[in-house]
Image (cartoon, rainbow, N blue to C red):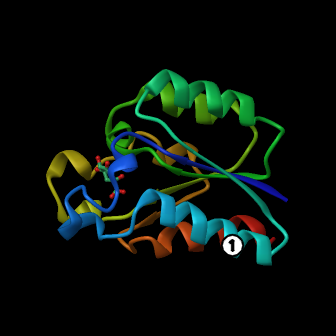
Amino acid sequence: KKILLINGPNLNLLGQREPGIYGSDTLESLEHNLKQIAEQRNVALTCMQSNHEGVIIDQIHLANRKYEGIIFNPGAFTHYSIAIRDAIAAIDVPVIEVHISNVHKRESFRHHSVMAAVTKGQIVGLGMKGYELALFALTDE
Ligand code: DQA
């Protein structure tokens, strides 16, 4: 199976960005660990990160029919990018939305996800473990 991991804006700064909220693990270590877990399950994991809405939309389009699933942390785009939401709705690949922090405990503008209704499911507030659980969910069936 082939799975794509997309991390959105500011997640390149994991490890140094608000560590009290997002922890001290870097994006590099997240990608490294997740690739190892994927390998053990015979899954080929491709990782990308972008701070740019259009780049993420292009990647979602390109992923259509090439991957069995997408693990996606849209960062702040979660809360307002209808364009990314429409890109997810346009493809056949199931998407699991992951948030490191428990967005429901935070500012009210983080409580709503415009993506949620077009995703397979959401994993929220479980830290880096959320990405692992998303990988299991996409590859167990
Ligand atoms: C986030 C939550 C978002 O509200 C925020 O803008 C992020 C990260 C999370 O992983 O908890 O950039 O998606």
Foreground: 63 or 10? 10
Identify which amino acid the numbered label 1 is placed on. Answer: Gln
Circle 1 residues within 10 Å: few <14, some 14–19, many ≥20: some
Helix, strand, or loop for circle 1?
A: helix
Residue at x 47%, y 42% (from the top left corner): 115
Q: Position of residue 22 (x, y in %)?
A: 29, 64
Residue at x 79%, y 52% (from the top left corner): 68
For the N terminus, the quadrant is bottom right
Is residue 78 something that shows in the picture? yes
Vertical comparison of 73 with 55: above or below: below
Instruction: Report whether 23 appears left or right of 44.
Output: left
Q: In the rendered image, which residue does mark 1 sit on? A: 36
Residue at x 73%, y 29% (from the top left corner): 62
Foreground: 24 or 91? 24
Q: Position of residue 49 (x, y in %)?
A: 51, 42
Vertical comparison of 106 with 83: above or below: below
Q: How many marks?
A: 1
For the C terminus, the quadrant is bottom right
Q: Position of residue 38 (x, y in %)?
A: 73, 69
Instruction: Report whether 45 appears left or right of 48.
Output: right
Foreground: 118 or 93? 93
Residue at x 54%, y 31% (from the top left corner): 56
Vertical comparison of 60 with 29: above or below: above
Q: Position of residue 37 (x, y in %)?
A: 68, 75
Badge 1 residue CB within 8 Å of ligand 1: no
Is residue 134 something that shows in the picture? no
Instruction: Report whether 125 appears left or right of 69.
Output: left
